[in-house]
Amino acid sequence: MEAYGPNLKLKHSLGARRPAHLAWLVLGRRLDAPPPVPLSTDPLLLPRRAPAFGSDAAMASPAAPIPDHQAPLPLPTVTDEILEDILLRLPTPTDLARASTACASFRRIITDRSFLRRFRVLHPPPLLGFVNRQGFHPAEPPHPSAPLAGALAGAADFSYTFVPTGRWIEPWRARDVRQGRVLIECVPEFTVADAEKFSLRDLELAVCDPLFRRYVLLPSIPEGLTAPLARPFDFESFLAPTAEDEDETSFRVICTAWNDTTLFAFVFSSITGEWNLAASPSFSSLDTSPPHYYNEFTSFCFVGNCIYWTRPWVDKLLVLDSLSMEFSVVNSVPSSNLRQDNLKSHVVAGENETPLILFLSDRNEDVSGDHLHIAKLNVSEPADQWKLEKIIPLPRQYSYSIICADKEFLFLQGIPKEYQNSRFPWEEYPFREYFSLDTKTSELKRICGKKRYFFDARPYFGFPPSLSEPCI
Amino acid sequence: MAAPESGDGNNGAARMVTLISSDNTRFEVEAAAASLSQTLQLTILDGGGGGGDGIPLPNVDSATLSKVLEYCIKHAPAAANGGAPNATAVDRAELERFDNEFVNIDQSVLYSLIMAAHNLEIEGLQSLVAKKVADMIKGKSPMEIRRTLGFPDPTPEEQAEMNAHMLEYGWAYE
């Protein structure tokens, strides 16, 4: 390899089409950097001891004078193991991508599948936006994920055109999102009035990876399994979380349905390719009553491996452990009727994944703003007792409602106060802001602004396309 | 030196071992501290390093070894507690403060520590120095990373590769 000296000169042009952010690279040296100095005295170029590691530097070992101690020293020749150890500790996907650009030996390690897998296990994926029935809604600037979310939006197909058309005229629509997978459904349109005509066998489900355009069409739930469920009142389906030690491309789908006496949970496993009836407790065995209204079960929250429904019973919490597939009920849930228009409470993950229940309130001494009440379930004696953990006041310029919850995050819609008491009917407010609230740090971050109400949105957490791998 | 030849005859005083750096400096240190090194642990368990023998470490110079031992002595009590599950928050905060100051050092010392921690297989020190280097890289542009780590400026071929990579990973540069 030739000496490095000649290459210190200004870099070759990238051509006229270069993006603005590459401009400084073309300059080679930044304008504020000292002018190039003769090779033999440039401390940047002269490794003090061993040659700098990596294919792009290993040949650089001219006689080494003592470098200026102010100058950075070359990292000594280190093994891939040490390099991995360093790169795994970079905090964000952006840092990883930039390190990958910086040097070929970093790049070789970072693009390795097993390295990326380890990185994804160590670093929780950032929030990139929302998925709802209309598609993907990326986080917008100045949210730190906006560039990553934009890259995902550009690369992925959230219209699911790569999935064969379903049996019904309706398009595929997202029902749940988790770990990069989207559970999509195609169902005949039915209203509350003709709900009784609906059979679970009419439900078409598929799990897809919108980024890598892969999908698995799920078979109908077999008639033998659905037979006891005459006239389902309603149903819900969602993706069970995949454990870290499971194969990254395997998944399970849970479908719950109920009639006036019994609750059913069916499970589809991508490994067996079959549905099973995993549990069918009666409401009376759970010491509770069936839901009164259509759509009451559609608000669920995952904490760890458990799914929590805070409705339909104001004072009870229905829990399904997605591993053991057992239902249970938590009693004495604190009253969520602190605000007339927002009865719905939600569950988020507290420390060690203990469930925290939270609800909005405007009944506070300071009546001018919304407050978020967070209560913690006391798992020791006396069991099922809740204790108020904290109250988070929310910025006053909005009036809030809860959209959904996931992990330790709560997602809120904020309607500017100036629209309230205005001529706009509720559903036609010209603008709504969407926020995430980290219940651990109380940090509220704006994600995006929308005209439409996001009643069915689920958060999408993930890595940008080049750091992702197929999840199906 | 009154240290027994093996752990068997321990009469209450902490057993000491001697480590010899590449430049022939002898360091006497408690066996518990030196045993944080997976590489040395077996030798020490076998009774090595006691008396006048000493364990030679031909890859570690005295300046680096003295720094490594400073780390080991500070962390040995917590490690003896099985990773200190019962450590108080105060103890943990004190160790954290020590660690932060410990890596606040010259880059050349840091690099020597990376190699020494790896050769001696001292897990806690390995992560501590890896984290420090990661902190030096984070938030920087590729060229800043190269300069921070003392890499030579890229050749035209490398520069072309870097440019192509930046285009592919455009989201990291917005």
Image (spheres, grey):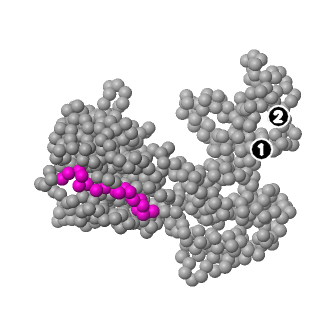
Chain holding disc 1: B
- The amino acid on which the numbered mark 1 sits, given as a three-letter code, is Thr
Image location of residue A266, percent across then percent down: 30, 44
Q: How many marks?
A: 2
| Left or right of B150 on screen, residue A277 | left
Q: Amino acid at mark 2?
A: Ile
Q: Nearer the viewer, residue B131 or B105?
A: B131
Q: Residue furthest left?
A: A193
| Residue on which disc 1 sits | B64
Q: Is residue B100 magenta?
A: no
Quadrant location of the N terminus of chain B in the rendered image: top right
Please tell me whether mark 2 sits on a helix, a strand or a loop. strand
Residue depicted at x 82% and y 67% = A41
Residue A244 visible (yes or no): yes
Asked whether residue A214 is drawn in magenta, I would say yes
Q: Tell me the element at label 1.
A: helix
| Residue denoted by label 2 | B55
In the displayed structure image, the side of residue A342 where residue A139 appears, left or right: right
At 73% from the left and 32% from the top, the residue drawn is B41
The reply to whether discs 1 and 2 touch (Cβ–Cβ < 8 Å) is no
Please give the name of the residue rendered at 45% of the width and 67% of the height, measured from the top-left corner.
Answer: A155
Mark 1 or mark 2, earlier in chain: 2
- Look at the image and tell me whether residue A141 can be seen: no
Question: Residue drawn 21% across and 44% down?
Answer: A227
Residue span colored magenta: A198-217
Neighbourhood count class around disc 2 (C-alpha, 10 Å): few under 14, some 14–19, many 20 upward: some
Report x, y in % for residue A441.
43, 46
User: In front: A1, or B163?
Assistant: A1
Residue B146 against residue A195 in the figure, above or below:
below
The answer to whether dots 1 and 2 both sit on one chain is yes
Provide the chain ID for the residue under circle 2: B
